[in-house]
Amino acid sequence: MRGNDAGPRRLHRGRMRLSLVLTSALLIGAAVPIAARAQDSTPAPATWRYQQVTPAVVARHGMVAADHPISSQVGAEILRRGGNAIDAIVAVAFAHAVVEPAAGNLGGGGFLVYRRRDGRSFALDFRETAPAAATREMYLDSAGNVTDDAWLGPRSIGVPGSVAGLWEMHRRFGRMPWRDVVAPAIALARDGHVIDEPRADMLRGSQSLFMRYESARRAWVPGGRPFAAGDTLRQSDLAATLQLIADSGRAGFYRGRTADLIVAEMQRTGGLITLADLAGYQPLWRTPVRGRYRGWRIITMPPVSSGGVTLVQALNILSGYRLGAFGSAPERHLLIEAERRAFLDRNSLLGDPAFVAMPLARLTSASYAARQRRTIRLDRATPTEGLPLHEGPHTTHYSVVDGRGNAASLTTTLNNGFGSKIFVAGAGFFLNDEMDDFTAKPGAINTMGIQQMGEANAIAPGKRMLSSMTPTIVLDPDGRLELVLGAEGGAMIISAVLQVIVNVVDHRMSLAEAVYAPRIHHNALPDSVAMEPAALSPEVRAQLESMGHHFFRNPYYFATVSAVRVTRHGLEGVTDPRIPSRAAGY
Ligand code: GLY
Protein backbone atom coordinates (compact mmCIF):
# COMPACT_ATOMS: atom_id res chain seq x y z
CA MET A 1 0.00 0.00 0.00
CA ARG A 2 1.29 3.47 -0.84
CA GLY A 3 -1.31 5.62 0.96
CA ASN A 4 -0.52 8.43 3.34
CA ASP A 5 -0.45 6.67 6.68
CA ALA A 6 1.45 3.41 6.28
CA GLY A 7 4.85 4.73 7.34
CA PRO A 8 7.67 5.05 4.87
CA ARG A 9 7.09 5.90 1.23
CA ARG A 10 9.07 5.31 -1.92
CA LEU A 11 8.59 8.57 -3.77
CA HIS A 12 11.06 9.25 -6.48
CA ARG A 13 14.62 8.55 -7.39
CA GLY A 14 17.05 11.39 -7.09
CA ARG A 15 19.06 13.34 -4.63
CA MET A 16 17.64 14.37 -1.31
CA ARG A 17 17.39 18.07 -0.61
CA LEU A 18 18.67 18.36 2.90
CA SER A 19 18.14 21.60 4.74
CA LEU A 20 21.32 20.90 6.65
CA VAL A 21 24.37 23.00 6.04
CA LEU A 22 27.01 20.61 4.79
CA THR A 23 30.03 20.73 6.98
CA SER A 24 33.39 21.96 5.89
CA ALA A 25 35.32 19.08 7.35
CA LEU A 26 38.74 18.77 5.87
CA LEU A 27 40.35 15.67 4.48
CA ILE A 28 44.05 15.41 5.13
CA GLY A 29 46.54 13.12 3.52
CA ALA A 30 46.11 10.58 0.79
CA ALA A 31 44.82 7.04 1.34
CA VAL A 32 47.65 5.05 2.86
CA PRO A 33 48.15 1.29 3.19
CA ILE A 34 47.05 0.01 6.55
CA ALA A 35 49.67 0.12 9.28
CA ALA A 36 52.10 1.98 7.01
CA ARG A 37 52.59 4.61 9.69
CA ALA A 38 52.50 2.26 12.65
CA GLN A 39 55.80 1.88 14.45
CA ASP A 40 55.39 -1.64 15.77
CA SER A 41 53.30 -3.29 13.10
CA THR A 42 53.38 -5.80 10.36
CA PRO A 43 50.98 -4.98 7.55
CA ALA A 44 47.66 -6.77 7.30
CA PRO A 45 47.65 -9.74 4.90
CA ALA A 46 47.79 -8.61 1.27
CA THR A 47 44.27 -9.88 0.64
CA TRP A 48 42.77 -7.94 3.55
CA ARG A 49 39.81 -6.06 2.08
CA TYR A 50 40.38 -2.75 3.85
CA GLN A 51 44.01 -2.34 2.84
CA GLN A 52 43.43 1.23 1.75
CA VAL A 53 42.58 3.42 4.70
CA THR A 54 40.44 6.48 4.10
CA PRO A 55 42.03 9.16 6.25
CA ALA A 56 40.10 10.61 9.16
CA VAL A 57 37.87 13.62 8.70
CA VAL A 58 39.58 16.46 10.56
CA ALA A 59 37.99 19.60 11.96
CA ARG A 60 38.90 22.17 14.61
CA HIS A 61 35.79 22.86 16.64
CA GLY A 62 33.64 19.77 16.88
CA MET A 63 33.41 16.26 15.46
CA VAL A 64 30.68 13.66 15.10
CA ALA A 65 31.31 10.07 14.01
CA ALA A 66 28.11 8.13 13.40
CA ASP A 67 27.50 5.16 11.19
CA HIS A 68 25.35 7.01 8.67
CA PRO A 69 26.76 10.12 6.94
CA ILE A 70 23.51 12.06 7.29
CA SER A 71 23.47 11.41 11.04
CA SER A 72 27.04 12.72 11.34
CA GLN A 73 26.05 15.85 9.40
CA VAL A 74 23.03 16.46 11.63
CA GLY A 75 25.25 16.32 14.72
CA ALA A 76 27.94 18.56 13.23
CA GLU A 77 25.31 21.15 12.33
CA ILE A 78 24.00 21.17 15.92
CA LEU A 79 27.57 21.76 17.16
CA ARG A 80 28.08 24.54 14.62
CA ARG A 81 24.91 26.23 15.92
CA GLY A 82 26.28 26.28 19.48
CA GLY A 83 24.93 23.00 20.80
CA ASN A 84 27.11 20.93 23.08
CA ALA A 85 28.07 17.25 22.75
CA ILE A 86 24.82 16.09 24.38
CA ASP A 87 22.65 18.26 22.13
CA ALA A 88 24.51 16.83 19.14
CA ILE A 89 24.32 13.22 20.22
CA VAL A 90 20.58 13.47 20.95
CA ALA A 91 19.99 15.03 17.53
CA VAL A 92 22.11 12.30 15.93
CA ALA A 93 20.15 9.57 17.71
CA PHE A 94 16.80 10.92 16.52
CA ALA A 95 18.09 11.47 12.96
CA HIS A 96 19.54 7.97 12.93
CA ALA A 97 16.12 6.56 13.83
CA VAL A 98 14.99 8.04 10.51
CA VAL A 99 17.86 7.24 8.15
CA GLU A 100 19.00 3.89 9.59
CA PRO A 101 15.83 2.07 10.66
CA ALA A 102 17.72 -1.22 11.04
CA ALA A 103 19.52 0.13 14.09
CA GLY A 104 18.72 3.76 14.84
CA ASN A 105 15.58 3.70 16.88
CA LEU A 106 12.79 5.01 19.02
CA GLY A 107 11.81 1.44 19.93
CA GLY A 108 15.11 0.21 21.40
CA GLY A 109 17.50 1.18 24.17
CA GLY A 110 21.13 2.00 24.84
CA PHE A 111 23.89 3.49 26.96
CA LEU A 112 25.72 6.81 27.22
CA VAL A 113 29.14 7.59 28.65
CA TYR A 114 29.65 11.34 28.99
CA ARG A 115 32.77 13.22 30.10
CA ARG A 116 32.26 16.87 30.80
CA ARG A 117 35.06 19.28 30.10
CA ASP A 118 35.54 19.75 33.88
CA GLY A 119 36.66 16.10 33.99
CA ARG A 120 33.52 14.64 35.62
CA SER A 121 32.12 11.53 33.97
CA PHE A 122 28.61 10.08 33.90
CA ALA A 123 26.94 6.95 32.58
CA LEU A 124 23.27 6.66 31.64
CA ASP A 125 21.58 3.27 31.27
CA PHE A 126 18.49 3.41 29.08
CA ARG A 127 18.39 -0.31 28.38
CA GLU A 128 15.04 -1.97 27.71
CA THR A 129 13.33 -3.92 30.50
CA ALA A 130 11.41 -7.20 30.42
CA PRO A 131 7.64 -6.52 30.41
CA ALA A 132 5.78 -7.26 33.65
CA ALA A 133 4.22 -10.33 32.01
CA ALA A 134 7.63 -11.88 31.13
CA THR A 135 8.48 -15.21 32.71
CA ARG A 136 11.74 -17.02 33.20
CA GLU A 137 11.03 -19.87 30.76
CA MET A 138 8.91 -17.96 28.29
CA TYR A 139 11.07 -18.97 25.31
CA LEU A 140 11.27 -22.71 26.00
CA ASP A 141 9.10 -25.15 24.08
CA SER A 142 7.72 -28.37 25.58
CA ALA A 143 11.02 -30.12 24.82
CA GLY A 144 12.98 -27.40 26.62
CA ASN A 145 14.42 -25.86 23.42
CA VAL A 146 14.67 -22.10 22.92
CA THR A 147 12.12 -20.90 20.36
CA ASP A 148 12.54 -18.24 17.67
CA ASP A 149 10.20 -15.86 19.44
CA ALA A 150 13.11 -14.94 21.71
CA TRP A 151 14.46 -12.84 18.80
CA LEU A 152 11.66 -12.45 16.28
CA GLY A 153 8.15 -11.12 16.54
CA PRO A 154 6.03 -9.56 19.28
CA ARG A 155 7.18 -11.64 22.26
CA SER A 156 10.85 -10.70 21.75
CA ILE A 157 10.27 -7.03 22.57
CA GLY A 158 11.57 -5.34 25.71
CA VAL A 159 10.03 -2.11 27.02
CA PRO A 160 11.85 0.58 24.98
CA GLY A 161 14.22 2.96 26.76
CA SER A 162 15.60 5.17 23.98
CA VAL A 163 13.27 8.16 24.13
CA ALA A 164 13.37 8.28 27.96
CA GLY A 165 17.18 8.08 27.82
CA LEU A 166 17.58 10.83 25.24
CA TRP A 167 15.13 13.02 27.17
CA GLU A 168 16.98 12.43 30.45
CA MET A 169 20.49 13.14 29.12
CA HIS A 170 19.23 16.31 27.46
CA ARG A 171 17.31 17.39 30.59
CA ARG A 172 20.47 17.11 32.65
CA PHE A 173 23.18 18.29 30.25
CA GLY A 174 21.68 19.78 27.08
CA ARG A 175 21.99 23.50 26.22
CA MET A 176 19.78 23.92 23.18
CA PRO A 177 15.97 23.74 23.41
CA TRP A 178 14.69 20.14 23.15
CA ARG A 179 12.58 21.00 20.12
CA ASP A 180 15.64 22.20 18.23
CA VAL A 181 17.50 18.91 18.68
CA VAL A 182 14.52 16.83 17.58
CA ALA A 183 13.75 19.13 14.61
CA PRO A 184 16.34 17.78 12.11
CA ALA A 185 14.91 14.26 12.49
CA ILE A 186 11.37 15.54 11.89
CA ALA A 187 12.54 17.29 8.71
CA LEU A 188 14.32 14.16 7.50
CA ALA A 189 11.28 11.97 8.12
CA ARG A 190 8.86 14.45 6.57
CA ASP A 191 10.94 15.57 3.57
CA GLY A 192 12.66 12.25 2.94
CA HIS A 193 16.17 11.04 2.30
CA VAL A 194 17.70 8.96 -0.47
CA ILE A 195 18.38 5.32 0.39
CA ASP A 196 21.93 4.26 -0.43
CA GLU A 197 23.10 0.84 -1.58
CA PRO A 198 24.22 -0.60 1.80
CA ARG A 199 20.91 0.35 3.45
CA ALA A 200 18.90 -0.97 0.48
CA ASP A 201 20.81 -4.24 0.98
CA MET A 202 19.77 -4.34 4.64
CA LEU A 203 16.13 -3.81 3.68
CA ARG A 204 16.31 -6.52 1.00
CA GLY A 205 17.95 -8.89 3.48
CA SER A 206 15.04 -8.56 5.92
CA GLN A 207 12.26 -8.60 3.34
CA SER A 208 11.14 -12.16 3.98
CA LEU A 209 10.86 -11.47 7.72
CA PHE A 210 8.93 -8.23 7.11
CA MET A 211 6.45 -10.27 5.08
CA ARG A 212 5.44 -12.19 8.22
CA TYR A 213 4.07 -9.11 9.99
CA GLU A 214 1.28 -7.02 8.52
CA SER A 215 2.52 -3.57 9.64
CA ALA A 216 6.13 -4.16 8.56
CA ARG A 217 5.03 -5.65 5.26
CA ARG A 218 2.75 -2.73 4.40
CA ALA A 219 5.34 -0.14 5.32
CA TRP A 220 8.56 -1.73 4.06
CA VAL A 221 7.56 -3.98 1.16
CA PRO A 222 4.89 -1.78 -0.42
CA GLY A 223 3.37 -3.46 -3.43
CA GLY A 224 5.51 -6.51 -2.76
CA ARG A 225 8.76 -4.71 -3.65
CA PRO A 226 11.38 -3.60 -1.11
CA PHE A 227 12.88 -0.13 -1.31
CA ALA A 228 15.87 0.17 -3.64
CA ALA A 229 19.01 2.30 -3.67
CA GLY A 230 18.15 5.73 -5.04
CA ASP A 231 14.57 5.70 -3.75
CA THR A 232 13.58 8.67 -1.60
CA LEU A 233 12.08 7.50 1.64
CA ARG A 234 9.49 9.71 3.33
CA GLN A 235 8.10 8.59 6.69
CA SER A 236 5.08 10.67 7.58
CA ASP A 237 3.96 8.55 10.55
CA LEU A 238 7.43 8.70 12.04
CA ALA A 239 7.51 12.48 11.49
CA ALA A 240 4.22 12.77 13.42
CA THR A 241 5.58 10.64 16.30
CA LEU A 242 8.76 12.73 16.42
CA GLN A 243 6.63 15.89 16.48
CA LEU A 244 4.77 14.54 19.53
CA ILE A 245 8.12 13.85 21.20
CA ALA A 246 9.36 17.34 20.28
CA ASP A 247 6.19 18.87 21.78
CA SER A 248 5.78 16.72 24.91
CA GLY A 249 9.21 15.19 25.65
CA ARG A 250 9.19 11.65 26.99
CA ALA A 251 5.41 11.79 27.51
CA GLY A 252 5.09 12.06 23.72
CA PHE A 253 6.26 8.44 23.55
CA TYR A 254 5.36 6.72 26.84
CA ARG A 255 1.83 8.12 27.17
CA GLY A 256 -0.99 9.22 24.90
CA ARG A 257 -1.15 8.48 21.18
CA THR A 258 2.25 6.80 20.71
CA ALA A 259 1.80 4.53 23.74
CA ASP A 260 -1.71 3.64 22.56
CA LEU A 261 -0.36 2.73 19.10
CA ILE A 262 2.39 0.53 20.60
CA VAL A 263 -0.11 -1.31 22.79
CA ALA A 264 -2.53 -1.68 19.85
CA GLU A 265 0.31 -3.29 17.86
CA MET A 266 0.99 -5.60 20.82
CA GLN A 267 -2.65 -6.61 20.97
CA ARG A 268 -2.84 -7.22 17.21
CA THR A 269 0.29 -9.38 17.13
CA GLY A 270 0.40 -11.03 20.58
CA GLY A 271 3.04 -8.92 22.35
CA LEU A 272 3.31 -8.43 26.11
CA ILE A 273 3.94 -4.70 26.57
CA THR A 274 1.19 -2.74 28.34
CA LEU A 275 0.49 0.93 28.97
CA ALA A 276 1.69 0.40 32.55
CA ASP A 277 5.01 -1.06 31.30
CA LEU A 278 5.52 2.03 29.15
CA ALA A 279 4.50 4.58 31.79
CA GLY A 280 6.78 2.91 34.36
CA TYR A 281 9.97 2.87 32.29
CA GLN A 282 12.91 4.76 33.89
CA PRO A 283 16.48 5.34 32.66
CA LEU A 284 19.16 5.08 35.37
CA TRP A 285 22.30 7.13 36.05
CA ARG A 286 25.20 4.85 36.98
CA THR A 287 28.84 5.22 37.97
CA PRO A 288 31.16 4.57 35.02
CA VAL A 289 33.63 1.69 35.15
CA ARG A 290 37.23 2.94 35.18
CA GLY A 291 40.40 1.16 34.17
CA ARG A 292 44.03 1.82 33.24
CA TYR A 293 45.97 0.41 30.33
CA ARG A 294 49.69 1.20 30.14
CA GLY A 295 48.95 4.52 31.86
CA TRP A 296 46.01 5.40 29.58
CA ARG A 297 42.72 5.82 31.45
CA ILE A 298 39.55 4.08 30.38
CA ILE A 299 36.06 5.40 31.25
CA THR A 300 33.36 3.00 30.14
CA MET A 301 29.92 1.52 30.71
CA PRO A 302 29.05 -0.51 33.83
CA PRO A 303 26.40 -3.25 34.01
CA VAL A 304 23.79 -3.80 32.85
CA SER A 305 26.12 -3.60 29.95
CA SER A 306 28.92 -6.13 30.22
CA GLY A 307 30.96 -4.03 27.80
CA GLY A 308 32.99 -1.94 30.22
CA VAL A 309 33.81 -4.69 32.71
CA THR A 310 34.80 -7.15 29.98
CA LEU A 311 36.89 -4.52 28.17
CA VAL A 312 38.76 -3.55 31.34
CA GLN A 313 39.29 -7.21 32.30
CA ALA A 314 40.81 -7.99 28.88
CA LEU A 315 43.02 -4.87 28.94
CA ASN A 316 44.20 -5.73 32.48
CA ILE A 317 45.26 -9.21 31.32
CA LEU A 318 47.04 -7.80 28.25
CA SER A 319 48.85 -5.16 30.30
CA GLY A 320 51.13 -7.88 31.71
CA TYR A 321 52.62 -8.66 28.28
CA ARG A 322 54.58 -7.00 25.54
CA LEU A 323 52.28 -7.92 22.68
CA GLY A 324 54.71 -8.05 19.78
CA ALA A 325 54.01 -7.05 16.20
CA PHE A 326 50.46 -6.39 15.05
CA GLY A 327 48.96 -9.46 13.37
CA SER A 328 51.71 -11.83 14.53
CA ALA A 329 50.76 -15.20 16.03
CA PRO A 330 51.98 -14.29 19.56
CA GLU A 331 49.97 -11.03 19.54
CA ARG A 332 46.77 -12.67 18.19
CA HIS A 333 47.18 -15.53 20.68
CA LEU A 334 47.31 -13.15 23.64
CA LEU A 335 44.27 -11.23 22.39
CA ILE A 336 42.30 -14.47 22.04
CA GLU A 337 43.31 -15.73 25.48
CA ALA A 338 42.45 -12.40 27.14
CA GLU A 339 39.06 -12.27 25.39
CA ARG A 340 38.37 -15.90 26.30
CA ARG A 341 38.85 -15.26 30.01
CA ALA A 342 37.01 -11.94 30.14
CA PHE A 343 34.03 -13.34 28.19
CA LEU A 344 33.83 -16.45 30.35
CA ASP A 345 33.20 -14.23 33.38
CA ARG A 346 30.84 -12.03 31.37
CA ASN A 347 28.73 -14.97 30.27
CA SER A 348 28.24 -16.39 33.73
CA LEU A 349 28.49 -13.58 36.30
CA LEU A 350 27.05 -10.36 34.90
CA GLY A 351 23.46 -9.18 34.82
CA ASP A 352 21.15 -6.41 36.02
CA PRO A 353 22.57 -4.89 39.25
CA ALA A 354 19.02 -4.60 40.61
CA PHE A 355 18.75 -8.40 40.52
CA VAL A 356 22.27 -9.84 40.94
CA ALA A 357 25.26 -9.04 43.12
CA MET A 358 28.44 -8.85 41.03
CA PRO A 359 32.07 -8.81 42.18
CA LEU A 360 32.91 -5.88 39.91
CA ALA A 361 35.82 -4.53 41.94
CA ARG A 362 37.46 -7.96 41.95
CA LEU A 363 36.83 -8.64 38.26
CA THR A 364 38.39 -5.32 37.24
CA SER A 365 41.35 -5.51 39.65
CA ALA A 366 45.00 -5.91 38.68
CA SER A 367 45.40 -8.84 41.09
CA TYR A 368 42.59 -10.80 39.40
CA ALA A 369 44.20 -10.15 35.99
CA ALA A 370 47.54 -11.40 37.35
CA ARG A 371 45.84 -14.62 38.51
CA GLN A 372 44.25 -15.07 35.09
CA ARG A 373 47.60 -14.50 33.36
CA ARG A 374 49.00 -17.43 35.32
CA THR A 375 46.52 -19.69 33.46
CA ILE A 376 47.74 -18.52 30.03
CA ARG A 377 50.37 -20.55 28.19
CA LEU A 378 52.33 -18.65 25.56
CA ASP A 379 52.65 -21.70 23.31
CA ARG A 380 49.16 -23.25 23.58
CA ALA A 381 45.51 -22.28 23.42
CA THR A 382 43.66 -22.97 26.68
CA PRO A 383 40.47 -24.92 25.95
CA THR A 384 37.62 -22.89 27.46
CA GLU A 385 36.20 -26.08 28.97
CA GLY A 386 39.28 -26.30 31.17
CA LEU A 387 38.84 -22.88 32.75
CA PRO A 388 36.86 -22.38 35.97
CA LEU A 389 33.31 -21.36 35.19
CA HIS A 390 31.63 -19.22 37.81
CA GLU A 391 28.18 -20.63 38.42
CA GLY A 392 26.11 -18.40 39.63
CA PRO A 393 23.61 -6.97 15.57
CA HIS A 394 21.87 -4.52 15.14
CA THR A 395 23.28 -1.73 17.10
CA THR A 396 24.69 1.70 16.32
CA HIS A 397 27.26 3.99 17.90
CA TYR A 398 27.89 7.74 17.88
CA SER A 399 30.96 9.55 19.21
CA VAL A 400 30.95 13.33 19.66
CA VAL A 401 33.47 15.88 20.90
CA ASP A 402 32.32 19.51 21.04
CA GLY A 403 34.34 22.72 20.91
CA ARG A 404 34.31 23.05 24.70
CA GLY A 405 35.94 19.65 25.27
CA ASN A 406 32.82 17.74 26.33
CA ALA A 407 32.82 14.18 25.02
CA ALA A 408 29.84 11.89 24.54
CA SER A 409 29.85 8.24 23.55
CA LEU A 410 26.46 6.65 22.93
CA THR A 411 25.53 3.17 21.73
CA THR A 412 21.94 2.25 21.02
CA THR A 413 20.25 -0.75 19.49
CA LEU A 414 17.21 -2.67 18.38
CA ASN A 415 19.33 -5.86 18.82
CA ASN A 416 19.04 -7.63 15.44
CA GLY A 417 18.57 -5.54 12.29
CA PHE A 418 15.08 -3.94 12.42
CA GLY A 419 14.68 -5.55 15.88
CA SER A 420 11.67 -7.85 16.28
CA LYS A 421 10.44 -6.79 12.77
CA ILE A 422 7.30 -5.58 14.55
CA PHE A 423 6.58 -2.11 13.16
CA VAL A 424 4.17 0.08 15.06
CA ALA A 425 1.39 0.90 12.60
CA GLY A 426 0.54 4.60 12.63
CA ALA A 427 3.63 5.51 14.68
CA GLY A 428 6.25 4.60 12.09
CA PHE A 429 9.01 2.76 14.00
CA PHE A 430 10.32 -0.74 14.71
CA LEU A 431 10.37 -2.32 18.17
CA ASN A 432 13.45 -4.14 19.48
CA ASP A 433 14.02 -7.88 19.98
CA GLU A 434 16.19 -7.29 23.02
CA MET A 435 14.68 -10.13 25.08
CA ASP A 436 17.10 -12.43 23.21
CA ASP A 437 19.97 -10.88 25.20
CA PHE A 438 18.67 -12.61 28.34
CA THR A 439 19.78 -16.17 29.07
CA ALA A 440 16.65 -17.94 27.78
CA LYS A 441 18.22 -21.23 28.87
CA PRO A 442 21.71 -21.71 30.38
CA GLY A 443 24.06 -23.07 27.71
CA ALA A 444 21.88 -22.08 24.73
CA ILE A 445 23.51 -19.89 22.07
CA ASN A 446 21.63 -16.67 21.28
CA THR A 447 21.49 -14.78 17.97
CA MET A 448 24.62 -12.83 18.98
CA GLY A 449 26.54 -16.14 19.12
CA ILE A 450 26.93 -15.99 22.90
CA GLN A 451 26.56 -19.05 25.10
CA GLN A 452 25.54 -17.74 28.52
CA MET A 453 25.61 -19.85 31.66
CA GLY A 454 24.12 -19.59 35.12
CA GLU A 455 21.34 -17.49 36.58
CA ALA A 456 22.71 -13.95 36.58
CA ASN A 457 21.05 -13.00 33.30
CA ALA A 458 17.87 -15.08 33.61
CA ILE A 459 14.56 -13.45 32.57
CA ALA A 460 12.48 -11.72 35.25
CA PRO A 461 9.72 -9.09 35.01
CA GLY A 462 11.11 -5.55 35.00
CA LYS A 463 14.71 -6.78 34.70
CA ARG A 464 17.23 -5.32 32.23
CA MET A 465 18.91 -7.84 29.91
CA LEU A 466 22.72 -8.00 29.81
CA SER A 467 24.30 -6.07 26.95
CA SER A 468 27.69 -5.94 25.23
CA MET A 469 27.47 -2.27 24.35
CA THR A 470 30.73 -0.51 25.19
CA PRO A 471 30.55 3.27 24.85
CA THR A 472 34.02 4.30 26.00
CA ILE A 473 36.22 7.35 26.54
CA VAL A 474 40.02 7.08 26.78
CA LEU A 475 42.30 9.68 28.37
CA ASP A 476 46.02 9.81 27.62
CA PRO A 477 48.52 9.13 30.44
CA ASP A 478 48.40 12.87 31.35
CA GLY A 479 44.64 12.70 31.80
CA ARG A 480 43.78 14.57 28.59
CA LEU A 481 40.87 13.47 26.40
CA GLU A 482 42.23 11.27 23.59
CA LEU A 483 39.58 8.89 22.23
CA VAL A 484 35.80 8.63 22.19
CA LEU A 485 34.68 5.34 20.73
CA GLY A 486 32.20 2.51 20.63
CA ALA A 487 30.74 0.08 18.15
CA GLU A 488 27.78 -1.88 16.92
CA GLY A 489 27.99 -5.64 16.49
CA GLY A 490 26.71 -7.67 19.46
CA ALA A 491 29.41 -9.41 21.48
CA MET A 492 31.99 -8.31 18.90
CA ILE A 493 31.51 -4.74 20.12
CA ILE A 494 33.71 -5.51 23.11
CA SER A 495 36.55 -7.09 21.11
CA ALA A 496 36.36 -4.31 18.50
CA VAL A 497 36.71 -1.57 21.12
CA LEU A 498 39.48 -3.59 22.80
CA GLN A 499 41.44 -4.01 19.56
CA VAL A 500 41.11 -0.37 18.50
CA ILE A 501 42.52 0.69 21.89
CA VAL A 502 45.36 -1.88 21.61
CA ASN A 503 46.08 -0.74 18.03
CA VAL A 504 46.37 2.88 19.14
CA VAL A 505 48.26 2.30 22.41
CA ASP A 506 50.50 -0.70 21.60
CA HIS A 507 50.84 -0.48 17.84
CA ARG A 508 50.80 3.31 17.58
CA MET A 509 48.37 3.25 14.71
CA SER A 510 46.49 6.31 13.58
CA LEU A 511 42.81 6.14 14.50
CA ALA A 512 41.85 5.28 10.92
CA GLU A 513 44.42 2.49 10.74
CA ALA A 514 43.27 1.17 14.09
CA VAL A 515 39.63 1.00 12.95
CA TYR A 516 40.38 -0.48 9.50
CA ALA A 517 42.70 -3.19 10.81
CA PRO A 518 41.53 -6.84 10.74
CA ARG A 519 40.03 -8.19 13.97
CA ILE A 520 39.49 -11.49 15.66
CA HIS A 521 36.96 -12.34 18.34
CA HIS A 522 36.56 -15.00 20.99
CA ASN A 523 33.43 -15.35 23.18
CA ALA A 524 34.89 -18.10 25.41
CA LEU A 525 32.01 -20.38 24.42
CA PRO A 526 31.54 -21.72 21.81
CA ASP A 527 35.31 -22.31 21.91
CA SER A 528 36.33 -21.04 18.49
CA VAL A 529 37.82 -17.82 17.17
CA ALA A 530 35.77 -15.77 14.75
CA MET A 531 37.79 -14.10 12.02
CA GLU A 532 36.99 -11.88 9.11
CA PRO A 533 37.90 -13.23 5.66
CA ALA A 534 41.66 -12.77 5.10
CA ALA A 535 42.12 -11.29 8.57
CA LEU A 536 45.10 -13.56 9.23
CA SER A 537 47.89 -14.54 6.87
CA PRO A 538 47.87 -18.28 6.09
CA GLU A 539 51.17 -18.63 8.00
CA VAL A 540 49.86 -16.94 11.15
CA ARG A 541 46.64 -18.95 11.02
CA ALA A 542 48.59 -22.21 10.66
CA GLN A 543 50.80 -21.22 13.59
CA LEU A 544 47.76 -20.46 15.77
CA GLU A 545 46.05 -23.72 14.76
CA SER A 546 49.17 -25.64 15.71
CA MET A 547 48.83 -24.00 19.16
CA GLY A 548 45.30 -25.40 19.49
CA HIS A 549 43.11 -22.50 18.31
CA HIS A 550 40.06 -23.28 16.18
CA PHE A 551 38.75 -20.74 13.70
CA PHE A 552 35.55 -20.05 11.92
CA ARG A 553 35.27 -17.51 9.16
CA ASN A 554 32.79 -14.77 9.78
CA PRO A 555 31.56 -13.80 6.31
CA TYR A 556 29.90 -10.56 7.38
CA TYR A 557 31.62 -7.92 9.45
CA PHE A 558 33.15 -7.54 12.83
CA ALA A 559 31.34 -4.77 14.55
CA THR A 560 31.59 -1.26 13.17
CA VAL A 561 33.41 1.34 15.20
CA SER A 562 32.67 5.09 15.20
CA ALA A 563 35.38 7.10 16.91
CA VAL A 564 36.81 10.56 17.49
CA ARG A 565 40.41 11.26 18.46
CA VAL A 566 41.79 14.50 19.81
CA THR A 567 45.12 15.25 18.08
CA ARG A 568 47.38 18.26 17.77
CA HIS A 569 46.11 18.65 14.18
CA GLY A 570 42.50 18.87 15.33
CA LEU A 571 39.65 16.48 15.99
CA GLU A 572 39.79 13.33 13.88
CA GLY A 573 36.55 11.52 13.08
CA VAL A 574 36.63 7.95 11.77
CA THR A 575 33.83 5.63 10.76
CA ASP A 576 34.20 1.98 9.90
CA PRO A 577 34.42 0.72 6.31
CA ARG A 578 32.45 -2.36 7.37
CA ILE A 579 29.29 -0.19 7.13
CA PRO A 580 30.08 2.79 4.90
CA SER A 581 29.57 6.16 6.55
CA ARG A 582 31.53 9.35 7.12
CA ALA A 583 32.23 11.54 10.11
CA ALA A 584 31.46 15.24 10.00
CA GLY A 585 32.91 18.20 11.83
CA TYR A 586 33.28 21.93 11.59
N1 GLY B 1 21.70 -6.31 21.68
C1 GLY B 1 23.10 -6.45 21.72
C2 GLY B 1 23.68 -6.02 23.00
O1 GLY B 1 23.13 -5.22 23.71
O2 GLY B 1 24.72 -6.51 23.35
Image (cartoon, helix red, strand yellow):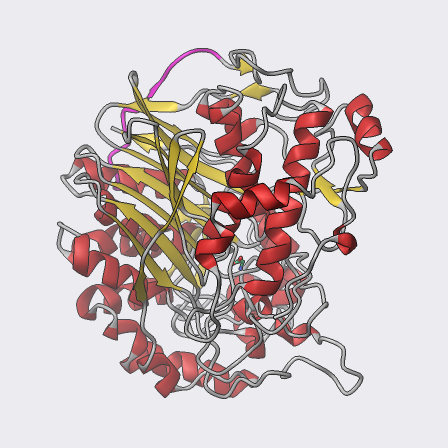
Foreground: 548 or 85?
A: 548
Foreground: 359 or 406?
A: 359
Please say if 373 is above or below 286: above
Foreground: 118 or 87?
A: 118
Q: Position of residue 502 (x, y in %)?
A: 52, 30
Does residue 468 appear anywhere in the picture?
A: yes
Does residue 469 appear anywhere in the picture?
A: no
Q: Is residue 472 shown left or right of residue 547? A: left
Q: Position of residue 87 (x, y in %)?
A: 22, 48
Please say if 266 is above or below 568: below
Magenta highlight on residue 111: no
Total marks placed: 0
Q: Position of residue 462 (x, y in %)?
A: 44, 80
Name the residue: 59% across, 68% down: 436
Dominant secondary structure of the magenta stretch? Answer: loop
Q: Is residue 104 shown left or right of residue 248? A: right
In terms of image quadrants, where is residue 154? bottom right
Q: The C terminus is located in which quarter?
A: top left
Magenta highlight on residue 18: yes
Q: Is residue 86 shown left or right of residue 109? A: left
Name the residue: 50% across, 20% down: 509
Q: Position of residue 187 (x, y in %)?
A: 28, 52
Residue span colored magenta:
17-30
Please say if 329 is above or below 361: above
